Image (spheres, coloured by chain):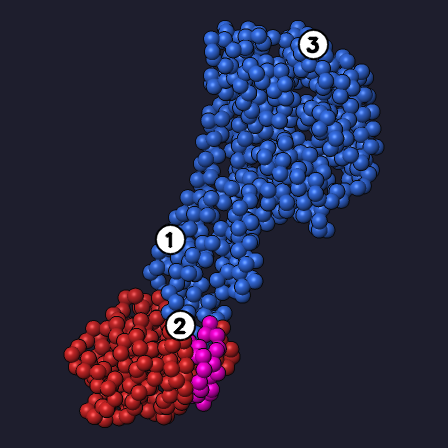
Chain colours: A red, B blue
Amino acid sequence: MIRIEGIRKRFGPLEVLRGASMSVGRGEVAALIGASGSGKSTLLRCLNGLESHDDGVIEIAGQSLPPRQSPDRPSPAMRALRRRVGMVFQQFNLFPHLSVLQNVMLGPIYAHATPRAEAAERARALLARVGLADKERARPATLSGGQQQRVAIARTLANQPEVILFDEPTSALDPRMTAEVLAVMADLAGEGMTMLVVSHAMGFVRRSAGTVHVFAKGEIVESGPPQQIFEGANHPQTQALLADAEQT
Amino acid sequence: MRRVATLIAIIHATAPTSLVRGDALDELRQRGALVWGGDQEGGGPYVYPDPNDPNRVVGFEVDLADALAAKLGTTAKFFQADWNTLPEFLRAGKIDVILNGYEWSAARAAQMRATRPYYLYELQLLARASDDSILGWEDLRTRAGRRRSVSVLSGSAALTYLRVHWAGDVDIVDYNGNTDAMMQVRNRVHDATLPDLPVALFYRHRPQGQGLKFVGPPVGRGAYVMFVRPEEARLTAALDQAIEALYRDGMLRRIYEKYGIWNGTQATLLETRADAAAKSDGPQGNPGDAGDSTAAVAPEEQAPRGWQVVRNYSGILLKSAGMTFLLSVLSMPIAILIGLLVALGRIYGPAWLRLLLAIYVEVLRGTPVMLQLYVIYFLLPEILPVRLDAMVAAVAGLAINYSAYEAEIYRAGLQAIPRGQMEAALALGLSRGAALRYVIVPQAVRIVVPPVTNDFIALFKDTSICSVIAVTELTKQYNVLANSSGAIVELAGLTALLYLAMSYPLSVAARRLERRMAETATPVPTI
């Protein structure tokens, strides 16, 4: 479902991605862990073209994404790709001027040209699934962070994506709200959704991820099932990272 | 005002000559109207609103225009424009002739074709009746260290006269209206004023001239002439003949006597060449003549006050307020739309477009709207084969000028939207256009409602600038009526009320809109 090979990306003098490679199979839940500011998010954002990469191969949802594509002026191919690749942001990024229901309907209506009635029906079903059926008329600003992130997940699901990228989805939330969101994500994982999750929530990673990729210094330094990574890590970067995670 | 006029003169010098090239005499006979230009603002006794019916104009030039038109075998049609912009309207072919107390001067004669004089004016010094220190011209000279000051009409021959003969002895202050200049003497701001004799005679027994006395004999004789376009030799000849005929059959004298401005000087009207009259100066004529003539003044209208003013003039003020309203509500939506497109282009457009739009905004913000209106109304028709109606030009000018300000407001509004909003919309697979239309712009609109409302209210008042291209709106109408009736306080109050009646509901509506946008979800627009 996702295959990246030799991705390079630099911001001015800083080389953030130095030939990262990894792959995620259909129906797999992969976690991407690494130190804060190490470039995990940048790698994730390259996968749906919100950042352009300088060099390397990206294949996602059956489509390849060439280097140096403009993030702001999406080509038709880029838009087609984004419709199949959902993304959930750390800061939720709900549309504050629209109601919860309208937030969820926006993608189907303007990206897929779904008829309004059908979009509304699907949006209500998704809100029910994330436990927010009673909030469809609310404004995002009146919801808690956990509720907002669940709406954001519903908004992404409304596009019926083949894969969802999660960019630190619980980093802005307190533990109780984190649990709400992780429950929804675990539910999705259980249904066979392909997911790539950048996260610091090690408990979730340990329980739900099929594969853990350790990112350090612009590369994937180690990949494997959680058990192997958490208990038998052999790369020094991984050991340092896990030691940090224990402390916090 | 004058500085802008100079600027326009410079532009004109570089612009191609007027497109109007027909024979005006044949043209005006064909259309059945001699269109003559004048300004009713402070226009007594020349042309001013009829106190009994403010929709009509009266004055000796109105009667003269009717008589002249009759001689030419047509009828007269009055065209209202600001006094010092009349040559622009003549040049642009909006009027056939300027007939509004225009003194002959070498500078004007070089630009336009002058008819023979139709009235020989002199200048009459006026001072406060109670001021015993001024009994003659010589009393203006500095005594005991205090310099006297004299108020005078801007751009008039009297101003030139004072500058030439008295600049070393008195301070000269110019005003846009004769009645303003007189009022400032009554108010003890200045010591004396120097209107043309017809003005002094006309207002002698009206409220505007009360408390003022004639000082010394009239001075600085000159000639009022009509001006036509330089190429209209036949029209000039016809008008010259008409003036002579009116003089000989006594009609001219009857008109001037009706308004109390006939005097002995006029006896030499036919022998006087305009340029010769203008050259003479110093004390002239016979003050006794002037005194005699006042006896001939028809019993003047009692100037209305208080509620009478409101009753008489509220109708015509309301009509002008309608024009103000129309100008505002037509131009603002266009300005908002252009402004939004310019702002979007400046933020999201390619580099060349961003540069172009930055220039657009800076040029329009950096030049006076008055000048922009001139360019659209007077200069554009000389370059392109379009003739814009004054109303269309006014709306276009205001809309374009305000679009620059709205563009900057929108730019700030758009830039205030967090980057994550665009990313979230793009991540859903929306095109950039759709993301702007459904996600970014609706949020920016909410941010800009207060500053745009502010501009809308400012626009209501800025429409007054349109009087320079002969669109009579509320402020111009107020000036015209206030100067002719003297009921300044009542009319000012009424005018202020009308402006408030337009802008306050707008404020309330905008506040309500803000609240509604903040509280409730708006429906997602259909595709």
Q: Which residue is mark 3?
A: B285
Residue B11, placed above or below residue A75: above
B247 sits left or right of B298 in the view: right
Residue B216 coordinates in the image, percent (x, y): 60, 8
Are the residues flagged by discs 1 and 2 in contact, CB closer than 8 Å? no
Whether A59 is among the magenta residues is: yes
**Residue B526 in view here:** no
Instruction: State the SS at label 3.
Output: loop
Whether B300 is among the magenta residues is: no
Are the residues flagged by discs 2 and 3 in contact, CB closer than 8 Å? no
Residue B15, placed above or below residue B154: below
Q: Give, as a three-letter code, the residue at label 1.
A: Arg
Residue B192 coordinates in the image, percent (x, y): 54, 15
Chain identity of mark 2: A
Q: CA distance from mark 2 to mark 3?
A: 91 Å
Q: Which residue is mark 2?
A: A13
Q: Which residue is mark 1?
A: B512
Give the magenta part as a residue range.
A51-72
At a point 71% along the width and 44% down the height, the residue shown is B15
